[in-house]
Image: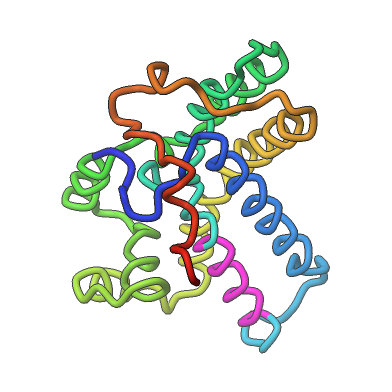
Amino acid sequence: MGEGKRGKPGSELERLQMFAELATEYFRMVELFTPDGRQVAADSVEAERRHWVELFRAALLRKFIVPEEHVSLKLVVRALRLCNYSGDPRLAEGAAEAAGMFTNGMIRDREALMAEIALADHDLFEDVLYGRLLHGDADRFRRSGWAGDYARLSRVAAGRFDSERALRKALDIVSYGLANELLRPPEPDSLPPDAGPPVPPDALRPPAGD
């Protein structure tokens, strides 16, 4: 399954611009809500607050991990390569480094994920994400009944944060490219077959009279 059509960026450059802003916001959120490191009692209100912050942080990572999302790291690295019109070596090397940090969840397609869910005998954060946090999928809700065990849920959610290394690297290199005007939309004939047609500028303008 490829990228979803709804809300698709008008160009690969717009994808990178969106990614840079959203990833910056994500890391700012992490900075603002990171606990101070002091130990707290497991049954305290502060421990519960930290638990929910951790869950929301993991949920916010979704758009960067799931391959079909418009600002997924998989599509962002592709966009970096397509928009690097000058062949800047720092951009090329940075894209390769970010890709080398990909976790399995960033590159598997939906069919692979569904196969894993069908065979899994272990806890999946996706069940919590879609059954409790983002959606109310009944099947996933039932499968995620274990989520009431905070320690167990924290262990599962922690696996999501492995993707932050690739996210930080991609943000650094995209920001460098944008700041130095080294990125521009690729020519239409250079896009891969599943990229879809570019959106003409006129399509982005509001109707006359609005």
Nearer the observer, 172 or 157? 172
For residue 80, which quarter of the picture? top right
In the rendered structure, the answer to whether residue 113 lies left or right of residue 68 reads left
* Magenta span contains residue 58: yes
Task: Where is residue 22? Give x, y as percent.
Answer: 62, 54
Q: Which residues are magenta?
A: 47-59
Task: Where is residue 145? Give x, y as percent.
Answer: 31, 76
In the image, residue 153 sits, relative to residue 156, either above or below, namely: below
In the rendered structure, the answer to whether residue 42 lies left or right of residue 110 reads right
Of the 4 image quadrants, the one containing the N terminus is: top left
Classified by dominant secondary structure, the portion drawn in magenta counts as: helix
Give the mark count. Answer: 0
Which residue is depicted at the point 51% across and 38% down? 73
In the image, residue 118 sits, relative to residue 137, either above or below, namely: above
Which residue is depicted at the point 78% across and 67% down? 32
Nearer the observer, 60 or 77? 77
Nearer the observer, 40 or 161? 161
Task: Where is residue 129? Give x, y as percent.
Answer: 39, 66
In the image, residue 130 sits, relative to residue 4, either above or below, namely: below
Task: Where is residue 196? Give x, y as percent.
Answer: 32, 34
In the rendered structure, the answer to whether residue 39 lies left or right of residue 21 reads right
Which residue is depicted at the point 51% across and 22% down? 82
Nearer the observer, 35 or 13? 13
* Magenta span contains residue 193: no
Which residue is depicted at the point 53% across and 55% down? 61
In the rendered structure, the answer to whether residue 109 lies left or right of residue 178 reads left
